[in-house]
Image: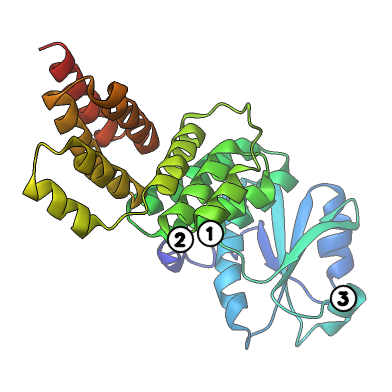
Amino acid sequence: MFGELIGKSKKDVAGSDLVKEATDATVMADVIEASRTHTVLVDFWAPWCGPCKQLTPILEKVVAGAKGAVKMVKINIDENPRFAAQLRVQSIPAVFAFKNGQPVDGFMGALPETQVKAFVDRLAGGDEDDGLEAALAEATEVLAQNDVGGAAQIFAEVLQVAPDNLKAIAGLARCYLLNGDAERAGEILAMAPETASDPELSAVRAALTLAAKGAGEVAAQQARVDADPNDHQARFELAQTLAGHNDLAGAADHLLKIIALDRAWNDDAARKELLTVLEAAGPGSDVAKQGRRRLSSILFS
């Protein structure tokens, strides 16, 4: 995250007119008066503060990306305690946003870049949706790399800014589901209206339905299928268990084998379950694409 910033010179970021150091003596000009023409972020920090060293480069990067809509002032509270005391700063890092001479927003602690960007976008009056979409794309990529915890953190950050964002609700619910917490996943999904329509939301709802069914023992069920490959009920139960453990590709494969051998078995149960599995995988997933292709080949052969 910080690699790009390490290569920047102070003239690029900190030495520009977007970011400057201030003192108690210059606060009136650098913060109060300056905030009458543009938003000013005040970053209270100290040389001994580890989280400050994490946050400040992120703030500088995001402010630089705002292209002048927001400016930043850094104040070392060890050398300049008066202004921090006036604002009742009790811990650092602490960030205050000033507009028209008054503090209007702020936060404490070293937030991740996605959350800092959303904070600055909101203050700058920019396109907050762009920041949210970027965060959602990042979370999706992180989840694809099997970093469930990292993805969950980003989805949760988006929901702090936009509590009704359907993709973030679906993403966070999926993270809980992947961690085996179906109950919490259901609670997250309940944040979305029942009538809400979103492909990922539908996918996670389908996955939650499958998780409720898949309570069997994979090894024991696989043994039953191996003993009698024509035991459709055993194969069907194995597919449900695999789906409940998020092995959607394995579940689809077994259901397709049932359909290939007996299309109408048990009142079309295998095909109906397959459609739920493909929905849980998501319309753009390889599981869904390959599953539909194989289903069409079986039905129209």
In the rendered image, which quarter contains the C terminus?
Answer: top left
Q: Check disc 1 and give the amino acid type.
A: Gln
Q: Secondary structure at mark 2?
A: helix
Q: Which residue is mark 1?
A: 153
Residue 234 visible, this angle = yes
Q: Which residue is mark 3?
A: 83
In the figure, residue 263 lies in which quadrant? top left
Q: Which amino acid, by three-letter code, is at mark 2? A: Gly
Q: Mark 3: which amino acid?
A: Phe
User: Residue at 18% of width from left, 36% of height from top?
Assistant: 232
Pointer 3 or 1: first along the chain:
3
- Give the label on residue 150, or none: 2
Q: Is residue 54 above or below residue 250?
A: below
Bin the neighbour count of mark 3 within 10 Å (Cα to Cα): few under 14, some 14-19, many 20 and up. Answer: some
CB under 8 Å between discs 1 and 2: yes
Q: CA distance from mark 2 to mark 3?
A: 36 Å
Local crowd size for mark 1, using a 10 Å CA cut-off: few (<14), some (14–19), many (≥20)? some
Which one is in front, 212 or 186? 212
Compared with 158, 200 (above or below) is above
